[in-house]
Amino acid sequence: MNKSRQIIKYVLADLLSAMLAWALFYIYRKTGIESDLYGSHVSFVPDKNFYLGITVLPIAWVAIYALAGTYNDIYRKSRLREFGQTLYVSLIGVLLIFFSLLLDDVIVSYRSYYSIFFVLFFLHFGITASSRFLITTHTARKIKSRKIGFPTLIIGSSQRAVNLFNEYESEPLSLGYRFIGFIHVDHNNGKYFGDLLPHLGGLEDLTRIIDEHKIEEIIIAIESSEHDFIGRIINELEDKDVIIKIIPDMYDILAGTVKMTSIFGSPLIIINPSLMPVWQQSMKRIIDILVSLFFLILLSPVFLLTSLIIKLSSRGPIFFTQERIGLHGNPFTIYKFRSMFVGAEKGVPMLSSDNDSRITPFGKFMRGIRLDEIPQFYNVLIGDMSLVGPRPERQYFIDQIMQRAPHYRHLHKVRPGITSWGQVKYGYAENVEEMIQRLKYDIIYIENMSLALDFKILFYTVKTVLQRSGK
């Protein structure tokens, strides 16, 4: 599979569709609307607005589609879902064009406005949806004929796993799985599989196998007696960009957790790595950039005043830097205003407390109103952090937390944040126990991520700052 080439196909199709739709609409606008206005036939003659429209607008359309996630997961497209998304985005885009570019047109009556809007909408939607349908249908045929497949790993080596493999392989039309091999979770070591599929190792080899074979999908096919392994497996996969599918029991089916994705093959519980709709992910990042830029500029006098007070009140640098663990477990350098005396962080890492003697008098004030966190807007700007997300920790404390709460790795699925629900509830954690208690709220946040929830957490953060009730 060549994902870049497939994305280029969609982008070119969208660009050409937008150009053609605007050209046809412009011809209609000249020969139809303006002919009615002037009472005589108006010939179409390309002008600067026509050429501007077929060069600038298609680029704007592609940008909107990118924000909506059209070019993500480019091979796993449902034609019905894509039709709905194209309809929705076309409606939003045409509304923007209408109110920004077309509403000031001189017209005979308001009926002309309706004609302008619906002609542009149906032209753009119809041409774009048709071109995408052709590409998606061609891709679907390649998948069904096994010319295209997603590298898939089976976890499990029991008869249940073998039955699932045989069922999918015997289907006349492929569902897109290209089975690379299997790993065992018990001591059978693949005796049921025989030579059907390569045995790649055990659970301890899982992350290495995913990286080596570029695995995109994982099917957990273990017996009911082995379900204790599921939690461990999912924890291992938290920071991996893979789609996890699980063979359900009857309880899962009755509980409504099994969703049909195809009328062929066994039904599976799908755990998708995407936590938010793509358009919300894009908006979250755009908001992060705009807000961090705004506050870095707006609070520049506060920066200078705070820097001056820190320099005059205690010996040492203005900023405090430290390595923290962020998205996908990658380390980054966090920036804060220094709130402790120089040398306070030497030796074994320690967490701060309310009566911590290492904190300077001005540092206590800064922590109370979160003033020490302001430099982290730079971390947000460069993409290390987000405005809202679980607080990043040091590897030293993560290792301690993981011993008691291995699901902590779940937090690495998202960018860490300046503030979080756990931060609003607990403030600064004073010990590992409080970190684990805060973890519960951060995981609930991740499982319910949305822009609305982010705004609510930001509101309560501002309230905490204004009331100086921060811990």
Image: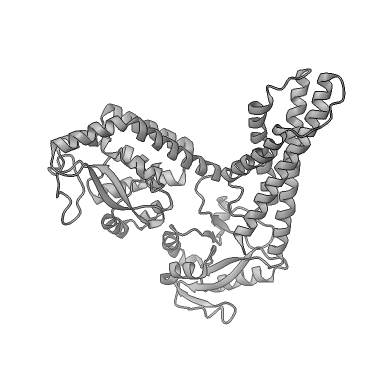
Q: Is residue 61 above or below residue 237?
A: above
Find residue 357 and report its horizontal and vertical position in percent.
Answer: 12, 42
Quarter that holds the N terminus = bottom right
Find residue 117 and report its horizontal and vertical position in percent.
Answer: 73, 29
Picture quadrant where residue 113 is located: top right
Say whether residue 316 is left or right of residue 57: left
Q: How many marks?
A: 0
Q: How is the image coloured?
A: one colour
Picture quadrant where residue 108 is located: top right
Residue at the (76%, 38%) spot, across then down:
23
Q: Is residue 214 above or below residue 91?
A: below
Quarter that holds the C terminus = top left
Q: Is residue 414 above or below residue 185?
A: above
Observer able to see residue 429: yes
Residue at the (35%, 58%) spot, across then down:
406
Residue at the (60%, 78%) spot, across then down:
196
Q: Residue furthest top?
A: 109
